Structures are given as C-alpha cells and as structure tokens.
Amino acid sequence: MNEFSIIDRYFNWHQSSVVVGIGDDCAVIDNDPDKQTVTSVDTLIGGVHFTSDTSPADIAYKSLAVNLSDIAAMGATPSHFTLAITLPHFDESWVSEFSQGLKEAARKYSVSLVGGDTTRGPLSITINVFGVINKGDSILRSGAMKGDLIFVSKTLGDAAYAWSQIQSNEKPSISLTESLNRPEPRIALGQRLVGIANSCIDISDGLEQDLSHILQSSKVGAIIDINKLPLSEPVRDYISNTGDWCVALAGGDDYELCFSVNKANKDKIRSIERELNIPLTEIGRVTTGGGLIVNGFSGECKSYSHF
Ligand SMILES: [Mg+2]
C-alpha cells in the first residue's frame, strides 16, 4: 500500500463541519469572527511514551486524548486535528486497529481529522489539535492571584503507578490500566471553569512541575498539603506501604486539571463537581511568592524531563 491508499483507507473520514478536509494541499476551516482558535501539538514516540505491548488502538486513543487535554486546560472546545504518523513498516492490522482507536476518541470528543502526513521510520505520532473559544475567554496559566484556592480534578498518580507496575513486571488493575492508556481529557470541566477559574493547567508532567508552571507564569507561590492530594485506593495503599509520594506528586500522565479560583467561587466549584460528577479537591492556596511548598512532605521527587 502506498501513502495515499493508506490515507484513503484508514484516515479519510467524512466530516461535515469542514469546508475542505483531507485530499487537498490544506484543510479549510470556517472562522467565526467572535471566536479565537487555540492550538497545541504533541508527539508520542514508541518506547518513550508507550511500551511495545501497548495496543495500537490505545496508542491512537491516548495520542489524541493528551492533545485534547491541552485544549481542555484553556477552557476551549476542540474542533479539528491533524495527524503526522511515522511507521517502521506497513502492517495492515496495526494501522487498522490504530485507525479504530483514533476514530473512537475523535467521535467521543467530537473532533474531526482534517489532514496529516504518513512517513516511514521509527514509530512516532504527532497530533496537532485545534479548538475554539469566545474571544478573551481562555483560562491562562498567568492568572493565579494571591489567596486563590487550588483544586485538582479526580485522582493523581494512577497512570504513573500503573506504569511503574508494568516496569516491574506486575499487572496493573483494569482501572489503573485504563488511566494509563485511555486518559480522559477534562473538556467539559475546562469549559465550565471559564469565568470562574483564574488559572488552569492540565497535569501531564506531574502536579509539582505543572503547578509550578502556573506559579511562575503568575509570579506567585503556593502551599499545598500532601494529605489533601486525591488518591485512588490502590495508589493510597501503595503510598502507605512505600512512602513514595512522588508517584502522585511527580508521576505525570494524569491529564487531570489543576486550577485556581477566588475563594468567593468555592460554591460554584462544588456545583460544577456535582453537575459533572467529577471529584474536585481543594489541595492548597496561592501565596505571594517563594515557589511551591508541599506541607507534610520533605523528600524530593525526580520530575519527568524529556532531556
Ligand atoms: Mg498541557
């Protein structure tokens, strides 16, 4: 199969909202004058971001989900994406399963594939995602204010714990495996936080590192309480057995949202929590400066770093 027949067979889905999709030099997408486009790109590499026994459907699903998570962190609505995929060789069943996983995530989050590139080489997947938001509504990292309460969604450390179990040849539970392979971008939550949260980030490299990005951009500090971090039961058990808080603080791959809100908005957060049925846990507050202080934790975690 050549590049064009691969595209035609596996990646040329029909979209209705697109003026020109796959099959021309560029995609053409209609613009609304009152809206802004948000965009983000991420690359996932075989052996770095997933193991050799991760299913192609999971690889595809996660590749799209982690990109959508960045759109969620802005409070925007994802609309389109492009895919650049490099394959070591053409394996029909692999590409077919990959296409199915990608389609599943695309349907679930209502985004259209509008273009891309297919090349040969070591396995790598680059997705560039686009979203829309009303002018000026994006929730930035730079908006945290002294006195803000800091919240995180759902639980931390599940994916990192699953990954560490796989590395030591243990089999993670179904729900932990799901957290690792099929993260759920918090799109509805991000949208509901527009006008309520002062700052927001999605946790991809670990709470410690990602919250620090908010603090640096906002020129503020923060105090969080280690005992307030929301944990699933297996991660809680693992930490109480090993004392390894780093799995939740710096493990990464959570794709939960970390955001700050004025105290006056606390009730609104509680009603969003009920409405969306996603636990939102207050873990600390924003201070004037001095970086991030983690009360109850004296160790040091090795944060994920690409280099
Ligand atoms: Mg991000």
Image (cartoon, grey):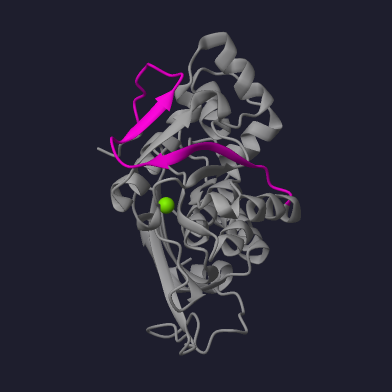
217 over 284 or under it: above or below: below
Q: Nearer the viewer, residue 280 or 121?
A: 280
Q: Residue at x 30, y 52 (%)?
A: 217
Q: Nearer the viewer, residue 275 or 13?
A: 275
Could you say where residue 262 lies in the image, as x and y percent from the top left?
Answer: 51, 52
Q: Nearer the viewer, residue 111 or 185?
A: 185
Residue 102 appearing in the image? no
Which stretch appears magenta? 277-303
258 over 199 or under it: above or below: above
Residue 12 located left or right of residue 40: right
Please identify the quadrant where the C terminus is shown: top left
Could you say where residue 64 lies in the image, as x and y percent from the top left?
Answer: 52, 57
Q: Is residue 237 magenta?
A: no
Q: Is residue 296 magenta?
A: yes
Q: Residue 112 sits in which quadrant?
A: bottom right
Q: In this figure, what is the number of numbered marks?
A: 0
284 over 168 or under it: above or below: below
Q: Residue at x 42, y 31 (%)?
A: 250
Residue 93 located left or right of residue 70: right
Could you say where residue 113 lies in the image, as x and y percent from the top left?
Answer: 53, 71
Q: Residue at x 34, y 52 (%)?
A: 121
Q: Residue furthest top?
A: 241
Q: Nearer the viewer, residue 94 or 31?
A: 31
Q: Residue at x 46, y 32 (%)?
A: 224
Residue 18 located left or right of residue 37: right
Residue 253 appearing in the image? yes
Could you say where residue 247 lies in the image, as x and y percent from the top left?
Answer: 48, 25
